[in-house]
């Protein structure tokens, strides 16, 4: 896609329909991470307060995020899940405040149907579920809400997923799981243009599993829906570089470039401006799918 085409590609506005269309422009989209949590692996606690979270959301929008993913549950290995009340209290006020302040669509990173409903009512235009709508009521809620949904693969749960994860064929098994969830969503009435998948880097995977999935991302793009990837500052980059979370920006940008060149459509990142710079270079060279 040329620079002008990139510039002409619709930037998502705050509605689900426009986000659905933007997801199909094939221009890679940058999704900014906004963790309103006390314990996220990458920025735990920095944006826990309403004021700091709102400020962070405005910054992500100003840096050029196409989407902002607001989450109230840390899913790092061993994290304590928040209560429903805690998750609602963290997410809804921030979504409501941001929805009135930024033109960028908001996504809610949750597995709870109650949080999905409250966040969409407050202005979220997408659901991002690391448990792929497997919680009771989640699939029905997502179908009812009529917004785009990202289905992510996770083996087991955040509490146990990194305890010796094993696969016979990680790419084939992740693909089969996501294909099955896509079928379930279509049967529940969610239109195909509202569906995305995500291999879930770091969610019940060893370094070898993560690298196999990144190398074979085309196995997921073959499912016919946009692929979101969350590689930003994750521990696999620490394993490869020896860097701590604060020093993983170079590795995150390299991983983002590889993911886009292998077909990823949405990059879920902590560093929006830097990631957009990478995409600008890839687009100018013409190597963005
Ligand atoms: N679709 C999708 N959603 C995700 N949500 C959370 C995290 C974990 O990263 P982060 O939110 O930065 O950390 P924490 O879960 O500790 O808040 N990763 C993904 C991901 O890879 N894909």
Image: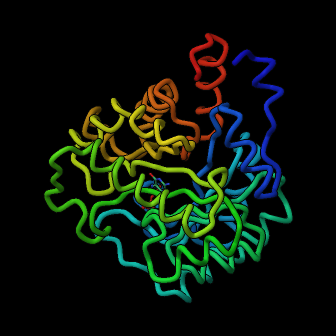
Instruction: Determine whether, in the image, residue 2 is placed left or right of residue 189.
Output: right
Residue extending furthest front?
187
- Way the structure is coloured: rainbow
- Above/below status of 206 relative to 211: below
Viewed as shown, does residue 112 lie left or right of 160? right
Along the line of sight, the residue nearer the viewer: 179 or 84: 179
Nearest the viewer among 158 and 138 is 138
Report the residue at 33% width, 56% height from top.
203
From the viewer's perspective, is residue 114 above or below residue 100?
A: below
Q: Relative to 105, does residue 267 appear above or below in the rendering?
A: above
Identify the residue at horizontal 62%, vertical 13% (top origin). 286
The residue lying at 51 percent from left, 70 percent from top is 37
- Image quarter where the N terminus lies is top right
Residue beneath the point at 75% across and 24% down: 6
In depth, the one of 28 and 268 nearer the eye is 28
**Image location (x, y in percent) of residue 196:** 55, 50
Please count the marks in the image: 0
Image coordinates of residue 96 in percent, x first then y, are: 77, 72
Residue 272 percent across, percent down from the top left = 62, 40
Please indicate whether residue 179 sits to the left or right of residue 53 in the image. Answer: left
Q: In the figure, residue 147 lies in which quadrant?
A: bottom right
Q: Give the camera-side residue of 168 and 214.
A: 168
Q: Quadrant of residue 282?
A: top right
């Amino acid at each position: 896609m040329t620079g002008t085409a990139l510039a002409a590609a619709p930037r998502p506005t705050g509605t689900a329909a426009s986000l659905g269309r933007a997801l199909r422009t094939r221009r890679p989209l940058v999704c900014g991470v906004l963790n309103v949590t006390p314990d996220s692996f990458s920025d735990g606690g920095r944006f826990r307060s309403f004021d700091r979270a709102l400020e962070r959301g405005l910054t992500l929008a100003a840096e050029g995020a196409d989407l902002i993913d607001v989450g109230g549950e840390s899913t790092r290995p061993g994290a304590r899940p928040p209560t429903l009340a805690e998750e609602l209290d963290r997410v809804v006020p921030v979504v409501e405040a941001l929805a009135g302040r930024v033109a960028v669509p908001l996504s809610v990173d949750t597995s709870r149907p109650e949080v999905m409903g409250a966040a969409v009512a407050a202005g979220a235009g997408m659901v991002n579920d690391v448990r792929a709508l497997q919680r009771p009521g989640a699939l029905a809620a997502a179908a009812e809400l009529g917004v785009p949904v990202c289905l992510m693969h996770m083996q087991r749960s955040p509490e146990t997923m990194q305890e010796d994860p094993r696969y016979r064929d990680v790419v084939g098994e992740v693909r089969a799981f996501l294909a099955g969830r896509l079928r379930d969503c279509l049967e529940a009435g969610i239109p195909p243009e509202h569906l995305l998948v995500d291999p879930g880097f770091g969610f019940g995977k060893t370094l070898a599993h993560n690298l196999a999935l990144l190398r074979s991302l085309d196995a997921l793009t073959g499912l016919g829906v946009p692929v979101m990837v969350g590689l930003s500052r994750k521990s696999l980059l620490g394993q490869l570089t020896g860097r701590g979370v604060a020093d993983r920006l170079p590795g995150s940008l390299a991983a983002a470039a590889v993911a886009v060149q292998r077909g990823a459509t949405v990059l879920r990142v902590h560093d929006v401006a830097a990631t957009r710079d990478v995409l600008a270079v890839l687009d100018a060279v013409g190597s963005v799918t």
